[in-house]
Image (tube, rainbow, N blue to C red):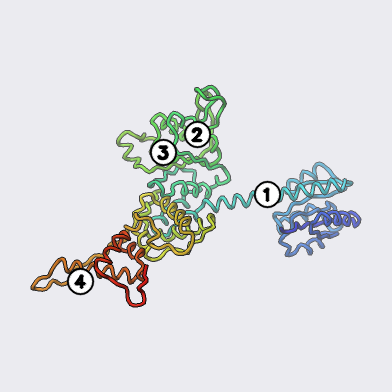
């Protein structure tokens, strides 16, 4: 752990020495100066100054003026002002400039040491809070939306352009495409990023409970309401409310959400008190809301209120070029979390996965990588490692008429088919070093079926490979 570095600027030598000794004994790295010009020299190029104890009245200037210099060079440095001529006005001015505390001489040196410890704790918490906010922004911004296809680039471009607006956004796309990731990217890239991001899945909560979840309730509003409850709209005040699967809302709730969007207020269940909120709403759905409007399933006025800025996320089958990038991303993710490192995928395995339709989209791909990480554990993922449904998706090799001529006198169909089957089996065996398990996987055959065909046809490996598996 890095030793905290403290600067003392004090012209009274006995006090400066006493402070140095106390701080040195507590394990701090201490540097001292008896005037401002000397202090400017000793902090030049020092990038790790954590705290400064500065006398207000120094031989060559004002300690508060030196604060300005110090804060420009070390903006994260905590400052405690020391003075023998304290006044309320000076204390206020020091704290307004950013001083952690203002201490009037004479003071108890043990109390000052306690104040130093508090200042260092405050600095540490501030750093941790900043790191956490930075990590959250990184975690939920654009680098978590993986892909380089045209469709995903267009989506990211829209996210970046609408993030700092206050407009309502409607995110559409199939289940598993990453609609919540896009909503989080919008929130954490906006001016509301320091406020809460509150998600709720409108399709996962029974209709009779959803109103209370959204707007809250007061004690006694219904059976089981034994205390007041704050709803998601109020929890999201100052931030973003993400309404996932909004197409599943009951008509009565659609009316209440419309009012909350239009007037930025609502009443909790059982209450007559109106609650005002400042909330940005991002909604998402996997159904065609325009079609739902025409069938009367979804209110037209709510649809237009939500659909101010539409963002569509393409299905994974519409951005197949992103599959290798996503596989690599999740391999790295689960490799670190599970402690099992897979080196990657063979070209044949990538070929299979690239032609698979991914009905579950990115969520399905992520689940597959997690399963492979656990079950295979290490090495390179080959076709045989994939579940059967993924192996079957490799494009079939077809025979064109130009590859086989039928002689004028005709040919025996069964003999020709048998010869072609022999050729396919031999090619698969040669490609896998006569490993029957892998050859069966390449041919999309059960191992027992392939073994029977090899025996029936009397196929044998080249000399030296008689002990093939």
Q: Which residue is drawn at 78% across and 52% down?
A: 64
Q: Residue 69: in sight, yes or no? A: no
Q: Residue 246 carries which label?
A: 3
Foreground tag (1 vs 4): 4
Residue 128 lies, in percent from the top left, at 65, 50
* Neighbours of disc 3 within 10 Å: few (<14), some (14-19), many (20+): many
* Left or right: 105 in relation to 127: right
Residue 381 lies, in percent from the top left, at 43, 62
Assign the C terminus to one quadrant of the image.
bottom left
Foreground tag (3 vs 2): 3
Mark 4 element type? helix
Question: What is the CA distance from the residue labelled 2 to the residue labelled 1?
Answer: 33 Å
To which quarter of the image does residue 464 belong?
bottom left
Mark 2 element type? loop
Residue under pointer 4: 403
Question: What is the CA distance from the residue labelled 3 to the residue labelled 2?
Answer: 18 Å
Q: Earlier in the sequence, mark 1 or mark 3?
A: 1
Residue under pointer 2: 264
* Left or right: 363 in relation to 33: left
Assign the N terminus to one quadrant of the image.
bottom right
Residue under pointer 1: 126
In this rendering, the answer to whether 346 lies above or below 375 is below
Q: Which of marks 2 and 1 is nearer the N terminus?
A: 1
């Amino acid at each position: 752990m890095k030793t905290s570095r403290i600067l003392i600027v004090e012209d009274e030598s006995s006090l400066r020495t006493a402070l140095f000794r106390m701080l040195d004994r507590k394990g701090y790295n201490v540097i001292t100066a008896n005037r401002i010009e000397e202090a400017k020299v000793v902090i030049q190029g020092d990038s790790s100054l954590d705290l400064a104890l500065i006398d207000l009245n120094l031989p060559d200037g004002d300690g508060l003026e030196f604060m300005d210099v110090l804060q420009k060079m070390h903006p994260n440095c905590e400052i405690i002002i020391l003075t023998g001529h304290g006044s309320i006005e000076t204390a206020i001015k020091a704290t307004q400039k950013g001083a952690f505390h203002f201490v009037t001489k004479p003071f108890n040196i043990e109390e000052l040491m306690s104040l130093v410890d508090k200042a260092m704790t405050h600095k540490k918490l501030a750093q941790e809070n900043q790191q956490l906010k930075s990590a959250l922004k990184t975690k939920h911004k654009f680098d978590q939306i993986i892909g380089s296809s045209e469709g995903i680039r267009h989506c990211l471009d829209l996210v970046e352009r609408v993030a700092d607006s206050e407009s309502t956004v409607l995110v559409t796309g199939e289940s598993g495409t990453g609609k919540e990731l896009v909503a989080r990217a919008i929130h954490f890239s906006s001016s509301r990023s320091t406020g809460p991001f509150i998600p709720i899945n409108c399709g996962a909560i029974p209709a009779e409970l959803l109103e209370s979840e959204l707007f809250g309730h007061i004690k006694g509003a219904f059976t089981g309401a034994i205390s007041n409850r704050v709803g998601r709209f109020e929890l999201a005040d100052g931030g973003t409310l993400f309404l996932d699967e909004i197409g599943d809302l009951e008509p009565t709730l659609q009316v209440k959400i419309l009012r909350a969007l239009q007037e930025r207020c609502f009443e909790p269940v059982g209450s007559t008190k109106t609650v005002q909120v400042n909330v940005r709403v991002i909604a998402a759905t996997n159904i065609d809301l325009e079609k739902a409007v025409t069938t009367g399933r979804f209110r037209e006025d709510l649809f237009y209120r939500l659909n101010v800025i539409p963002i569509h996320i393409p299905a994974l089958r519409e951005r197949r070029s992103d599959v290798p990038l996503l596989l690599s991303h999740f391999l790295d993710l689960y490799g670190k979390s599970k402690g099992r490192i897979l080196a990657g995928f063979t070209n044949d395995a990538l070929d299979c996965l690239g032609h698979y339709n991914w009905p579950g989209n990115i969520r399905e791909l992520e689940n597959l990588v997690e399963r492979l990480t656990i079950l295979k554990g290490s090495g390179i993922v080959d076709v045989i490692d994939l579940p059967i449904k993924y192996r079957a998706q490799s494009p079939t090799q077809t025979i064109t008429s130009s590859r086989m001529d039928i002689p004028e006198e005709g040919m025996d169909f069964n003999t020709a088919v048998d010869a072609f089957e022999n050729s396919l089996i031999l090619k698969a065996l040669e490609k896998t070093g006569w490993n029957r398990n892998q050859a069966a996987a390449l041919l999309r055959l059960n191992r027992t079926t392939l073994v029977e065909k090899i025996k029936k046809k009397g196929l044998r490996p080249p000399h030296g490979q008689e002990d093939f598996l």
